[in-house]
Amino acid sequence: MKFEKYHGAGNDFVVVDSRVGERNWASLASEMCERHFGVGSDGLIVVGQTVDHMPTMRMFNPDGSESEACGNGLRCFVKYVVDHSIVSGDEFDVDTLGGRRSVTALRTDGGSVDAAEVSMGVPIFVPADVPVQVPEREGPVLGLLLTVRDVPVTVNVVSIGNPHAVTFVTDDVSTYPLCQRGPAVEKHAVFPSRVNFEVARVLGREDIEARVWERGAGETLACGSGACAIAVTSRLLGYCDDVVRIHLPGGVLTVTWSGGTSEVLLRGPVKQVFVGDWPD
């Protein structure tokens, strides 16, 4: 089976084309994403197409679970389908498990796609839809106090097609014990579908540094939906304006959200790393 590998700000993905044959994608993701015995990646992206030629994207985590949304993966998907002429033009829609997304391929002066801007949809704040189990309330779940390994952690909750819990700190995020607290937050009882966990420090109204513990994958160098969750909750708390740069270990992602029912836009780089054959 042919595959290609891409990364968006260090968040790396194996991409395969389901139009040439179906597989057990969950099982395949566990095998291919394994960094010692497989290709190694943060997820498996499966390219498909509806009967009316709408491109479809599915993304499976290294543990075999399927994610509703993946911003960095979606940008990698954009480059793949444009480079392979699966779509015509640089602006089109993509069907994902989290809903239809509008995307734009961004080209260098030489004409190659080296970045993309993708819509991540309208943020979801209704607790039952995130989902997060809290007493019924109106408006976003901000300042939710959790006890994680006997340590209090205050999180701000939002869904960007998939659930996120964001905590803000005043110290350098590199010092945060993410690998210890991340798994506990991910599987905390208030999150029935588990959750992605972000730790962020505000550097200024246009810049935030962050690290991410991804549901089903662990710590990654970048997370597109996580960057969006950070930007949205930061704006709600008054920490930033409509456009903010999220500085992650793998690179910088730019998020735009003007509040209310406007869609979140994510912009960032994308690069093909290599191509290969998987012994099927």
Image: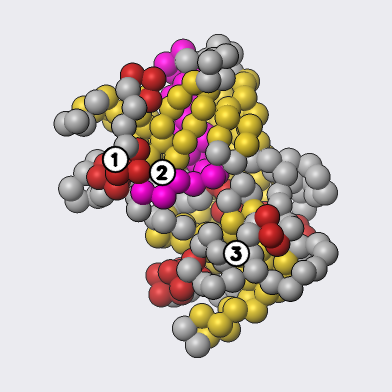
| Residue 208 in sight from this viewpoint | no
* Residue placed under numbered mark 2 in the picture: 60
Which mark is on residue 28? 1
* Residue placed under numbered mark 3 in the picture: 165
Q: Amino acid type of disc 2?
A: Phe
Mark 2 neighbour class, 10 Å CA radius: few under 14, some 14 to 19, many 20 or more: many
Q: Can you say whether 126 is above or below 242 in the image?
A: below
Q: Nearer the viewer, mark 3 or mark 1?
A: 1
Pick whichever of labels 2 and 3 is earlier in the sequence: 2
Which mark is on residue 218? none
Q: Residue at x 55, y 39 (%)?
A: 97
> What's drawn in magenta, residue-wise?
64-85
Q: Residue at x 65, y 79 (%)?
A: 145
The answer to whether mark 2 and mark 3 are in CB contact below 8 A is no
Quadrant for residue 28, please give it: top left
Marks 1/2: CA–CA distance? 9 Å
136 displayed left or right of 91: right
- Judged from the image, the secondary structure of the residue bearing numbered disc 1 is helix
Residue 251 lies in the magenta stretch = no
Marks 2/3: CA–CA distance? 20 Å
- Judged from the image, the secondary structure of the residue bearing numbered disc 3 is strand
* Residue 197 on image: x %, y %: 53, 63
- Judged from the image, the secondary structure of the residue bearing numbered disc 2 is strand
Quadrant for residue 180, please give it: bottom left
